[in-house]
Amino acid sequence: MANFILACMLCAPSAWAAGKPFWVERDAYVEAEYVYAVGAAEGSSSREKGRKDAMADARDALADFVQLTELGRLKSEVIREHISDRADGSVDVYMLLRTLYEPLVRLKKEVDTASLARLDRLARIQEKSFKDLSAQFERLDKVHAQTSGVRTQLEELVRNIERTSGLATGTVRMGMTEVEVAQVAGPAVQREKCGSDLALNYRKVWILLKSGVAACYVATERYTSPCMACNAWGAAPLK
């Protein structure tokens, strides 16, 4: 019977069989007014480094258990420590921390309250940003409407210029008087006189009257004066 029990003990897996203490079976747990957390640093290059890493691991386990991203300056007490030397010279360090439950609860409430406050501030900032963005879109819509109106006016002005210029060159005939020119092409935009010669501006063209009657026309960009001759460069005879 004793041999059977011994065989069972040798075959059964346990923390001790792997060189681990029994209290590493649970990562973190609550007992009475304390919260316990286990940290491990296996294969450390030195005992000092192993203790440091095991402490950090235990603090992380505690933070995960109470759902905190960090513990800040919250104090914990090391109540158990186990160090095992390996054949290769490295060490395994296991550490059990004990932390009072009440300070953890207070810290948790403070962090949650701060998180809610940050979320509330973020919500207000987002709401303000949305309102500002909406206002900007409204201003852009107004500007777009205004520019569209200006563009429409400019297009209409261009059409009027084209219409006026086309009307002048298409309807004015050679030999017409100033009155007859006005009857078919409308009133001139500008009127310039040089002795008996007269020049009537219709936006893009000038109608040149020689000795009181229409003789030729010239594009505005080539017009020089009402005295220019109909055989000058740029001038063209009327039909």
Image (cartoon, grey):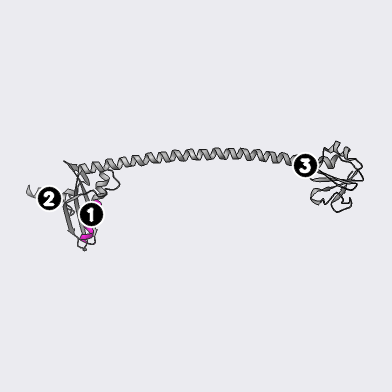
Number of the front mark, 3 or 2:
3
Return the x and y of residue 238 as percentages of the image width and height: 88, 45
Res 202 quadrant in image: top right
| Numbered circles on residues, count | 3
Q: Which residue is disc 3 drawn over?
A: 162
Q: Residue lying furthest bottom in this view? A: 89
Mark 1 and mark 3: span between their CA atoms?
88 Å
| First along the sequence among labels 1 and 3 | 1
Mark 1 or mark 3, whichever is nearer to me: 3
In this figure, which residue is indicated by the disc labeled 1?
A: 54
- Where 146 sits versus 1, above or below? above
Q: Main secondary structure of the magenta part?
A: helix
**Is residue 52 highlighted in magenta?**
yes
Q: Amino acid at mark 1?
A: Ala
Mark 2 lies on a secondary structure that is helix
Magenta stretch containing residue 136, yes or no? no
Q: Most extreme residue toward the front, as rendered?
A: 195
- Residue 80 image offset from top left, x and y in percent: 16, 52
Report whether 10 appears left or right of 54: left
Which mark's residue is nearer the viewer, 1 or 2?
Answer: 1
Q: CA distance from mark 3 to mark 2?
A: 111 Å
Q: Position of residue 71 (x, y in %)?
A: 26, 48
Q: Secondary structure at mark 3?
A: helix
Left/right placement of residue 98 relative to residue 161 reads left
Question: What amino acid is found at the position of numbered circle 3 in the picture?
Answer: Glu
Query: What's the amino acid at mark 2?
Result: Ala
Which region shows up in magenta?
A: 45-57
In the image, residue 44 lies at what x, y percent? 24, 59
